[in-house]
Image (cartoon, grey):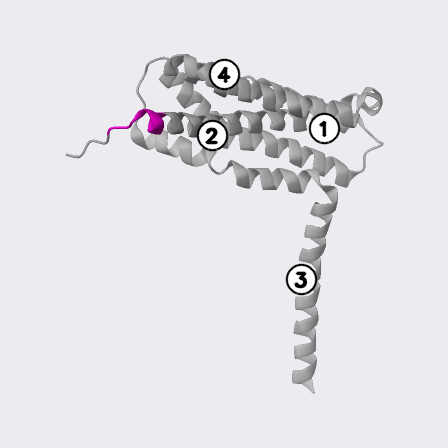
Amino acid sequence: MIVWVLGPMEKMAGRFVDGIYDCGVMTSVCFMVCVSLERYLVIVHPLWYRYKRTIKTSVTVCVMVWVTTIVFNFAVFPWVDDSVVKLTISVFLLLPFPLLIFFLVRTLKALSASVSVNSAEKRRIVGMLVSVLLIYTLLFLPITVMFLVEGAGSDISFLARSLCRLLIRLSPLADLVLYIFIRKATLGKLLASVCCCKEESNDSHTSAVNIDNI
């Protein structure tokens, strides 16, 4: 049986990599909440959002998110027990869940009574908010529950732990889905390209039929 013994440098490198990974996960969830909050404010409080929305505010929020996660992962977590780290991360990741549900429900209620927003824009907004909630529920919630269970001192099977970590690694693909919904121009180009492909396919089929008839 071979046993690997890690030296001080290897342990430090491992903790650094874990810190970067946890920082990325926490930051990703924070920005998902920011996306949902922004859509909620646009629909439910449009006047307030119009006057308060500035580049300075957006930059400040982004800096605060990154600074908070970096401080937690590199200035606090290295000095506390692993169970405390997992419990803290799980609570941090669990707090957005009720917020995402609240933003979705209130936005749906406001959209149903709104006459100034066209149907296409309503579908895009609802699709984005539902995507955020689904991404969080399917990819981030399992590992959050895993951290809660492990932080409480309970054991989790290897299969369940591997599945949770596999799901969280799919989050970059989920970010692509959110980008498509956020960028109206990107969504329009994507739909236009699909329509063009269909039209070209139909034109090719029509030409082939005409040639055969000749």
Range drawn in magenta:
5-11
Which callout, 1 or 4, points at the residue further toward the start of the chain? 1
Return the residue at label 4.
75
- 177 in relation to 80, above or below: below
State the SS at label 3: helix
| Dot 4 and dot 3 residues touching (CB under 8 Å) | no
Count of numbered labels shown in the rendering: 4
Disc 2 versus disc 1: nearer the observer: 2
Label 2 and label 1: CA atoms lie apart by: 28 Å
Which callout, 2 or 1, points at the residue further toward the start of the chain? 2
Return the residue at label 1.
39
Residue name at image x 70 percent, y 80 percent: 210
Residue name at image x 53 percent, y 24 percent: 26
Q: Is residue 58 visible?
A: yes
Query: For the view shown, which residue lies furthest in the bottom direction?
Result: 214
Query: Could you say which is closer to the camera, residue 100 or residue 113?
Result: 100
Return the residue at label 2.
21
Disc 3 versus disc 2: nearer the observer: 2
Residue 146's spot in the image, x, y percent?
40, 23
- Specify the label residue 181 is tagged with: none
Query: Could you say which is closer to the camera, residue 102 or residue 7?
Result: 7
The amino acid type found where label 3 is placed reads Cys
Q: Quadrant of the N terminus?
A: top left
The amino acid type found where label 2 is placed reads Tyr
- 207 in relation to 37, above or below: below
Label 1 and label 4: CA atoms lie apart by: 33 Å
Label 4 crowd bin: few (<14), some (14–19), many (20+), radius 10 Å? few
Residue name at image x 72 percent, y 54 percent: 192
The amino acid type found where label 4 is placed reads Ala
Return the residue at label 3.
197
- 125 in relation to 88, above or below: below
Disc 4 versus disc 2: nearer the observer: 4
